[in-house]
């Protein structure tokens, strides 16, 4: 069953499966088609997200376990809702070894463990390296285990006599300083997270062991869809997805990050991606291209950089610091190839990875780029190229492709995006900060392509991984309409309350404006993370305590010294920001694909990167607001967010009751002085969505004036489902149509 829509719930110990079940009546009233949960398999103790699975054979007991999972299924089924589950096939948590029975067995028995081949471990390199020790590496034997503070590890049979140091030397693992992990790790991991060890799901027995329980749920009719996390980390994503498809016919979407212009591999038996490609287009179309030059000039005064040059620098930083172990392991597979050649090839990828023999063009582009940038390494790069092309399924090709995505993700999203604050609304997962927004023509082309090729793919605007919520981005997009005013404000504010690192400062001002009235402690936590991700003055590994203290203190200082001025500026862009937010949401919900609503974002939600975007949601307030909407009162566009709830409820309920309306796609174009400010399309001839672009400029130029929108030919009267107003004329004046809300959803019951 393909859901009409999904609603993402972050199930966690503080909001468990029973709490999720209690949420179902609200979701049903909202119009949701399926409850979409974060991972539900047993995870590391206290996990707030579930991506750190320790036992895939059972439901997470900290969330209520199997009984609570079944209660959620019963509640959803009683309400007519489906269930979509987030699945993590790439890795498992090994942070607390005793909670992961497979990893514990490997540590205890080494290569002789029945699970030794389940993890991607280089046993030829010696004992498994575990980077956990701090500056006081004193071990002890405690209760039959080797212990370091709260960390405990198994002792191999017959090796427990003598001092702790002697016992340690006899084990199949070595506890080493935590700083050695990035350079010397002997097992594959998730990105640069040493506490998440990769598993080899390409092996049939590992696939079965890690998937049997979830597949049991699917076979029992208790799960209707699967969202596959991080497929790029797998040895053979296409092969994995084909194996999964052979075991289930449920809705299947993949968290594949596509570069602008990149297509999902055609051989993958999936319904589509999780929607970051849609996010880039929907958010980008509300950005004024005219703001590019002045915002670029502003960024230049704050240490501005060329994005592609910085992108390369950041990727090299990742290969030379964070992922050294991976570079070395790959180089060891190609005789005579230095680590630098491997790293240069990784840096040169135009997309996250290739999937040879698919994506050969991306592979070729990476090879050519690497040879051009480093001609001194050309012969070594040629060796890599020839070897990979000769055996695209071999270990060298597999490891290069698995790892390139790690380099791109960590280099771009988790480093360069924090160093390039020209307009942070564009610095999003799957985004292209170098492209200043998206034209209406590009938007329409992307939507039409989705309808033609991936009509059942997921679409999204906010997720647990986005750098800032959709509504923060919507407000920040307004800055492109008034770049001069924003630049003047930033210069005034900076003179009174600057930060000692200019690019971080420009990001900080945008974050303050975008999320205002954000509490200082929330902004402080965000900027601390941003500074460490940027890796300019400090990082997660090498700290600058004085700088970090200044960053953490800045939000409170800025509010105290500049609060009224910031509030005044935000008031200038708040209403157009709401217009953008409503426009984004309508385009996503009414457009091609299966729309997802991230928890809480049915109201205006001004969140930043995790963990800020995983804060508890006030569902009681949302339920009360829904009660008032159901009474028939039209909400104003204000900071309660009720207008957004109204848009979400209206579209989702229609999608669920009349799914046949949401097929086909054709752009509609306005005529008149303000035609460029209207973005409209029709799904079938009887449903039209209309949104307002660049609202501040529209108001400045005199509003809609004579601008009209010709509606598709046919018989019957059009009704705006958001206001209840009817329109008999086939040519609608936009000033009249959009007089209540900056968006409209027109439906016509054709009487022919």
Image: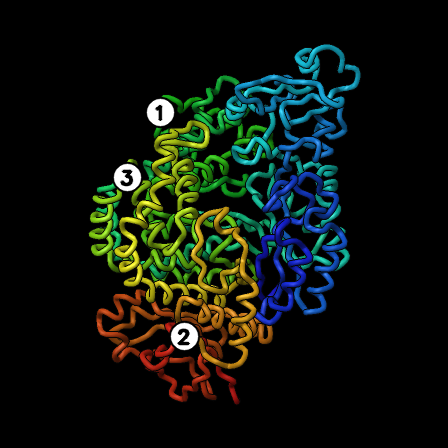
Q: CA distance from mark 2 to mark 3?
A: 39 Å
Mark closest to the chain's N terminus, 2 or 3: 3
Residue 94 horizontal/vertical position (percent): 64, 33
Q: Quadrant of the N terminus?
A: bottom right
Identify the secondary structure beneath mark 3.
helix
Taking depth in this image into account, of 315 and 373 the one nearest to the observer is 315
Mark closest to the chain's N terminus, 1 or 2: 1
Dots 1, 2 in contact, CB < 8 A: no
Q: Which residue is mark 1?
A: 375
Dots 2, 3 in contact, CB < 8 A: no
Dots 1, 3 in contact, CB < 8 A: no
Residue at the image point whose x is 52% and y is 19% from the top:
135
Residue 343 horizontal/vertical position (percent): 44, 28
Residue at the image point whose x is 41% and y is 86% from the top:
727
Residue at the image point whose x is 74% and y is 40% from the top:
209
> Residue 636, which numbered label?
2
């Amino acid at each position: 069953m393909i859901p009409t829509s999904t609603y993402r719930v972050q199930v966690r110990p503080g909001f468990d499966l029973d709490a999720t079940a209690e949420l179902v009546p609200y979701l049903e009233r909202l119009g949701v088609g399926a409850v979409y949960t974060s991972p539900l398999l047993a995870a590391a103790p206290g996990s707030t997200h579930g991506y750190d699975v320790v036992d895939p054979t059972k439901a997470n007991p900290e969330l209520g376990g199997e009984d609570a999972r079944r209660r959620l299924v019963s509640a959803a089924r009683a309400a007519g809702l489906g269930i979509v589950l987030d699945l993590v096939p790439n890795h498992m948590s090994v942070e607390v070894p005793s909670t992961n029975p497979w990893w514990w067995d490997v540590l205890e028995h080494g290569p002789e463990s029945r699970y030794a081949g389940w993890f991607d471990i280089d046993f030829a390199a010696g004992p498994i390296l575990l980077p956990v020790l701090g500056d006081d590496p004193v071990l002890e034997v405690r209760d039959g285990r080797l212990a370091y503070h709260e960390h405990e590890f198994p002792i191999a049979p017959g090796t427990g006599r003598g001092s702790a140091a002697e016992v340690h030397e006899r084990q199949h693992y070595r506890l080493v300083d935590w700083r050695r992990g990035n350079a010397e790790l002997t097992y594959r991991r998730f990105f640069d997270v040493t506490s998440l060890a990769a598993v080899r799901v390409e092996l049939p027995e590992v696939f079965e062991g890690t998937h049997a329980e979830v597949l049991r749920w699917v076979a029992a009719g208790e799960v209707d869809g699967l969202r596959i996390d991080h497929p790029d980390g797998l040895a053979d994503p296409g092969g994995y997805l084909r194996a999964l498809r052979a075991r289930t016919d449920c809705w299947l979407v993949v968290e594949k990050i596509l570069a602008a212009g990149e297509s999902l591999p055609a051989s993958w038996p999936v319904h589509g991606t999780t929607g970051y490609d849609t996010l880039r287009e929907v958010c980008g179309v509300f950005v004024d291209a005219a703001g590019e030059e002045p915002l670029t000039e502003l960024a230049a005064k704050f240490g501005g950089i060329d994005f592609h040059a910085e992108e390369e620098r950041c990727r090299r930083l990742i290969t030379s610091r964070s992922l050294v172990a991976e570079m070395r392991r790959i180089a060891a597979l190609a005789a005579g190839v230095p680590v630098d050649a491997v790293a240069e090839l990784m840096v040169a990828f135009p997309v996250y990875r290739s999937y040879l023999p698919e994506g050969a063009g991306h592979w070729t582009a990476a090879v050519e780029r690497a040879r051009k940038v480093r001609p001194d390494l050309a012969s070594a790069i040629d060796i890599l190229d020839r070897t990979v092309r000769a055996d695209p399924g071999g270990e060298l090709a597999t490891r290069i492709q698995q790892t390139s995505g790690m380099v791109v993700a960590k280099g771009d999203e988790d480093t360069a995006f924090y160093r390039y604050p020209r307009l942070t609304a564009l610095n999003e997962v799957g985004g292209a900060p170098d492209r200043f927004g998206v034209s209406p023509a590009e938007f329409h082309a992307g939507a039409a392509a989705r309808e033609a090729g991936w009509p059942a793919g997921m679409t999204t605007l906010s997720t647990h991984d986005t750098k800032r919520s959709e509504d923060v981005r919507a407000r920040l997009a307004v800055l492109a309409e008034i770049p001069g005013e924003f630049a003047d404000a930033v210069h005034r504010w900076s003179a009174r309350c600057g930060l000692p690192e200019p690019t971080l400062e420009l990001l900080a001002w945008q974050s303050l404006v975008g999320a205002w009235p954000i509490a200082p402690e929330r902004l402080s936590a965000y900027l601390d993370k941003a500074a460490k991700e940027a890796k300019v003055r400090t990082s997660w590994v090498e700290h600058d305590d004085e700088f970090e203290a200044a960053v953490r203190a800045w939000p409170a200082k800025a509010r105290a010294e500049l609060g009224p001025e910031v509030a005044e500026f935000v008031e200038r862009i708040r209403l157009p920001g709401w217009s953008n937010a409503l426009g984004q949401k309508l385009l996503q919900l009414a457009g091609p694909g299966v729309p997802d609503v991230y928890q809480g974002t049915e109201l205006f939600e001004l969140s930043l990167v995790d963990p800020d975007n995983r804060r508890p949601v006030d569902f009681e307030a949302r339920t009360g607001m829904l009660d008032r909407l159901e009474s028939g009162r039209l909400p104003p566009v204000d900071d309660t967010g009720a207008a957004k709830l109204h848009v979400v409820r209206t579209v989702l309920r229609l999608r669920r009751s009349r799914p046949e309306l949401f097929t086909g796609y054709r752009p509609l174009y306005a005529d008149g002085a303000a035609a460029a400010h209207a973005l409209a399309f029709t799904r079938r001839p009887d449903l039209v969505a209309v949104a307002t672009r660049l609202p501040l400029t529209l108001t400045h130029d005199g509003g809609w004036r004579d601008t009209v929108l010709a509606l598709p030919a046919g018989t019957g009267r059009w009704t705006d489902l958001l206001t209840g107003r009817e329109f008999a004329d086939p040519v609608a004046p936009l000033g009249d149509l959009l007089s209540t809300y900056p968006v409209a959803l027109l439906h016509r019951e054709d009487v022919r």
